[in-house]
Image (cartoon, coloured by chain):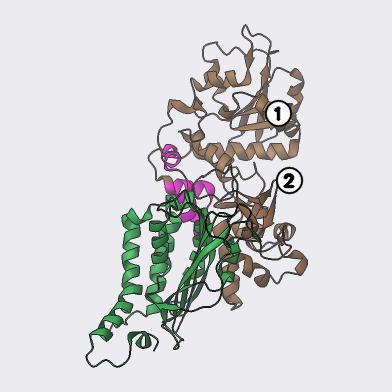
Chain colours: A brown, B green
Amino acid sequence: MTARKARVLWIDDDPERQKDAENLSDEELTVEFKCEGLNFSAPGALREIARYDLLLVDYRLEKLPDQTIRYMGPAVLGLLRSVDDDTPAYLVSAQGAADLAKFPGLSGFEEFLKLAELQGVLRMRERLKDDVAGYRAIAAIRRRTNADAAILDLLRVPKASQPFLLEAVPSSVKQALVRSPTADVASGSPELPGRLGFARWVRRTLLQKAGPLLPSLHAATRVGMKEPRFRETRAFDAALYKGIFSKSHDRRWWAATIDGVVLERQRRLDLPPGLPWELGPKVFRLQKSDVAKCVVCGEAQPEIVARDTDTEREVPVHQRHSTPAPQRDFTPFFAEERVVE
Amino acid sequence: MAKKRKASDASLIREHLLAALEFLTRSRPVGTYAKDLLRSCTTAQPLLKGSKENSWSLVMAPWTFELSGARYRGQEDCIKIVMGAEIRTAGGRLLRQTVPICVVAKPRCFSHGPPWCKQPAGQDGEAATRRLHFDYDANVTKWPKHHLQVGGNPQELRHAGSYYYAVAEDPSEPRVPAPSLDFVLALDLVMREFNTGLDLPQEPGWRKLVVRSEELSLKPYFDVAHDELGRSNREVPLIEHLSQ
């Protein structure tokens, strides 16, 4: 049985974008473009829009023809949320992410996409398909089912990482996944209820912050490797995140499963026990040039990744060469944000 | 019917530590306000889980509590507590256990009495003003196997922070004969005495772990001391008895 074709609606006031939408479409994905003939106040118009799997909404819609009222993207989303809680919407703009402050109402959207990203056809096509598949998988969760089991299935969590992941999911998000969606979705709260709330937690918290899942620099540092070497090795394939929305972000690895890989090798080689960043170079017999080094002292075995406040880049450092970031957040079960001393 | 074999000390301690690590890695206050401890526990847990029941070693990555104000008078300058834990067992026996604790204070002068100098000579960073550790060492005979020591090797906690050691490493004496607090009891003590932001000592799950630690760590020590002190015609002082 083949999967139902993914249907995406792109609402934009620039007719030139139609060809971009057509470029994205293929046999598994239809990106319909609407510029003319949109009347949001017509009976049933919003419900019609809500039948799509995903919406791409331009921020500025002032030039949208056939409108008696001039809308902006967030206003269109507001109207949609009056009839529908579950349809995800991404904001589109030609302007860069550095200008995010210019986009009031952004928090109601699941994602911010630059036009140039949407024009990167091959990558974006796969990403949109993957995102739609993720939203559909969430929507397919039966109400009153076991939330933990559903989450482990959606995120395809390896056994060793399951207890850590389940602790990290806020109970409100967990329960909302298996309850009827509520009407409070438009609030823009990071923990908004309903199924979209779960998707938002996955995309904005689990896949963004180091915690149960690690970005590659964090994962590499944890096992005492330099990032390029870590990205090359296949040893951690079992720890690679393969759950919903895995194509929306750079690759991520399950922290506890990474530890398990290192410890399994340590036992097999009959080496003395130790911490993952101490054992990694030994169990993988790393060359000196592949061993992670602290950017402050140049010594091996930096235990963590911290932000260099001069460059704003994350770098591997020894814990002793870092301090907790003054403006850190305290999201439970996610890593402490630290800055280089 | 086969007689059930008595579990070894190493196996009982391992089982207890696994329960403690399980509790801490699932504790929301720890996951929110003591992320360093959480990281240490999450790396220690699989290490211990995969170890042999009767012969295992555990070195926990040191962790830091950022203190949020003073709990008692005199703690106004204390900003951090740094802790660690290291345990070694073999052949079903506990061989060595050390739980170091460092109390770190704001930059201040240690050379002159009050009023403190505003420009401390030689050190202008954070300083460990107290360092103590609880030890158990099965192999020593020169001093009590269970003891509490002030000072000691600062390298044990060097991973956790770069601060000036205002405590001399030597002399290592005296080693005060005392029951060696294990990881759970030492953590409980710190949470009770300092403002770590963690209220675990009032949580039933944590209290159960503390009571179990008392059974495993304190009871054998006090039993030995009680029996020895209750014996008639004693000729060996307790401190020597505890060293044997």
Q: Which residues are magenta?
A: A148-177
Q: Determine which of the numbered discs, if any, sits on residue A99 in the image.
A: 1
Give the percent coordinates (x, y) of residue A96: 73, 30
Q: Residues within 10 Å of mark 2 (few under 14, many from 20)?
A: few
Instruction: Report the front residue among B181 and B25.
Output: B181
Identify the image quadrant of residue A54: top right
- Amino acid bearing label 1: Asp
Question: How many residues crowd mark 1 within 10 Å: few (<14), some (14–19), many (20+)?
Answer: few
Residue found 64% across the figure and 11% down from its top: A70
Residue at 42% x, 72% y: name it. B14
Q: In this figure, which residue is indicated by the disc labeled 2?
A: A310
Element type where label 1 sits in the image: helix
Which label's residue is closer to the chain start, 1 or 2?
1
Subunit of mark 1?
Answer: A
Q: Looking at the figure, which quarter contains the C terminus of chain B?
A: bottom left
Rendered position, A188 above or below A278: above
